[in-house]
Image (tube, rainbow, N blue to C red):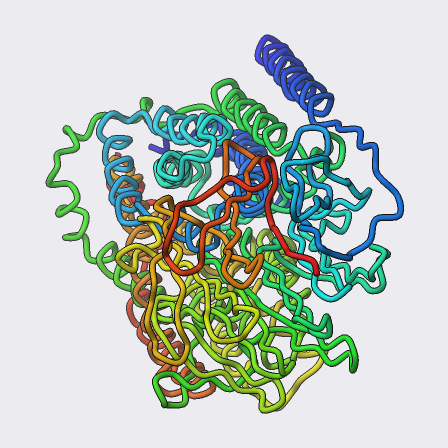
Amino acid sequence: MYLSSIDRPHAAHPSRRRSLFHVSGNVFALGAVSLITDISSEMVTAVLPVYLMIGLHLSPAVYGVVDGTYTGATALLRLVGGYVADRTRRRKFIAGLGYGFSAVAKLGLPAAGNAVGVIGAVIAIDRTGKGLRTAPRDALITLSTPPQLYGRAFGVHRMMDTVGAFAGPLVALGILAATGQAYDAVFVASFCIAAFGVLVLVLFVRDRGGEQPSKGTVALSSLGGLLRIAPVRRLVLAACLAGMVTIGDGFVYLLLQRREDLSVGWFPLLAVGTNLSYLLLATPLGVLADKIGRQKVVLAGYTALMLVYLLLFGPFGGWPLLVVVLALYGLFYASTDGVLIALAGPVLPTGVRTTGIALIQTGQAMAYLVSSVLFGLAWTVWGPASAIRIAAVLVAVAVFAVALLLRGIPSTDADEEQPA
Amino acid sequence: MTRRIVLALVGAVVLAMVAVGYGVLTSAREHTTVAAANALSLVGPRIMFRSTAPDSKGHLALVAKDDPDGPRSVSALGCLRVYAAAGTGACLRQDGALTTFQIAILDRNLNVEKAIPLVGVPNRTRVSGDGRLVAWTVFVAGDSYNHGRFSTRAGLIDLRSDDMVDSLEFLSVTLDGHPYTAPDLNFWGITFAADDNLFYATMSTGGNRYLVEGDIAAKTVRTIAKNVECPSLSPDGTRIAFKSAIDGDPAKGWRLSVLDLASGTRTPLAEARSVDDQPAWLDANTIGYSIPRGTGDSDVWVVPADGSGSPRLLIPHAESPAALG
């Protein structure tokens, strides 16, 4: 039996043409929470450097100190959060806790004054919140959606999320202009917006954890048990492998800027371009993934990444290169970020799904951290052109390896296959 | 359902009132009226600075060199960092929108002669002794896709030829005598030599910070010392005042020292507090710098450049000092 039975009738009638963005109420509510929260967090991200340097007179090196700490701890907390969410089956509560942490952190910033240690701690709380909420939220999306529509659900969710990321800096800008550069007004407004996000979560998101039949307690050994499921093991491995060949946006934009001799003024716009492509493609690619197979879309995404790397030192240049590279880079995100979790959903037993999602996301993040350090080293030793070509070759190898690893991953729910 | 919608609406209204109310309160607080003095000019003997006093916050201001505590002449010009030499001023300021800034080049009478857009938060600025070269450093971040890494960009312009170096990272780098490339090269804190070709700056890579000597015509920079940040060349060109991270760790703070270029001797100055600023030579034997007091306010202090004496408060509620004439 499928626990989200209210959504079943939609899936049972594929002949009824649904609109592109049709998802269950719960997914829409989670998307709205993400949208609102992203407005709040991107408002702060946009003004934080200005605040630290102009408002508090801290130097760039201090910014590094404030920012660089606690990265490992938050990765571990993500796993702990996933585990606790599964164990208590209160995914909404853990996600809400995560959203709440980040909301409170917004008030911590003006309260911290110019105490560097406190600012670092406040940012760590914000990160902790982000780490805590991601896996329970994604688990809730899968639990509120029929398995054959996971791709669409994640596509719509990621699109709404990115819309929030777009609006955030604009809202911050408006507040700064209206208040005569009062940074604390931005932080207070950001808190209010984040608090509204928590309110929407509390009021409109329904927890799916409590409705399922008990499958025995989720023990600490469930993490090991998860890895004993062959498709899960292959998925985690594939996620880590893919993370290892992703060099990071900073490097891609830096190479693009050097290649095109862009004035430094264009630098922030590169991320905007990628975001726009991501926003436009997330939903169509999610729907496509449901239709033709999620593996294919993920592999196409990594092929797009390989093309991005090759184009950075390829024969083309000028505006066409910029547009093509940013479009492909957004396509890479749109066809891998949500689709990978959509792919993982069906093979993760519902009882440990949050832990499984957290495991995949943590593995990917850790691999990504290692790869950016290694790419930095390769750049120093062999120069940027060789380093990026090596990266492209490695992506090609990874595409094949991931293709082998993901072959035969079922696209229907693991629980559903068992006799009910 | 309706009850939930009502609750959400009530929540939205209350939270919006909090946000707007706070915004209105702060904008009333931040509003400063400046009785700007007209006909100010960049002639000495005076000290130019950025005021952080409540009634003239953010404005370029001047005091007499022999009466730094005395009345200040406040310009209508708002800046985030200022510097001047030989009748050329540099004012790093906001350019309307959120993350766009510009460097305004000022003539002797504080008129804006030229404005160059900068991307990133203004951090340092310097003008060469004869007023021909102007340098700036900005700090680039605020992009969550960058995973928190920060970078700085330091550029310069020759006002006579209008030749510009967008960012020092495009020059050829020699580290410890060997050609060097790395993705994590960052430069900040340029200071110019008297010949309008050589300059000094900080370069960071691989977690280390170096003093580099650059050659504008040859488009090269080479490292000459380690753990030297925000250099400032003395008027006679023999010594460099700088800040260095305590035990090489920026988390522990910075100390001010003076490096003798010929001998390589480093003399720690009498200032025991952490100084996070590019020091300025206010005369041949005096180093000026700012020390923050609370949020958004700071004082300009001075200390002898030979390591003797003790720090002295020069101008309260001020930062970014530059000696004129």
Q: Is residue A382 visible?
A: yes
Q: Please report the residue visible at 56 percent of the width from the left and 85 percent of the height from the top.
A: B215
Outermost top residue: B3
Residue A326 drawn above or below residue A62 = below
Q: Nearer the viewer, residue B65 or A370?
A: B65
Q: Where residue A178 sits in the image (x, y, percent)?
A: 76, 31
Residue B100 drawn above or below residue A198 = below
Q: Quadrant of the C terminus of chain B?
A: bottom right
Outermost front residue: B66
Q: Is residue A10 visible?
A: no
Q: Please report the residue visible at 10 percent of the width from the left and 41 percent of the height from the top.
A: A221
Rendered image quadrant of residue A364: bottom left
Q: Where residue B214 sits in the image (x, y, percent)?
A: 53, 81
Q: Please report the residue visible at 24 percent of the width from the left and 31 percent of the height from the top.
A: A84
Outermost right residue: B39
Q: Where residue A27 sits in the image (x, y, percent)?
A: 51, 35
Q: Quadrant of the N terminus of chain B?
A: top right
Rendered image quadrant of residue A213: top left
How many numbered discs, if any?
Answer: 0
Rendered image quadrant of residue B314: top right
A68 horizontally vs A317: left or right: left
A238 horizontally vs B2: left or right: left
Q: Nearer the viewer, residue B27 or A420?
A: B27
Residue B59 drawn above or below residue A198 = below
Q: Where residue B46 sits in the image (x, y, percent)?
A: 70, 51
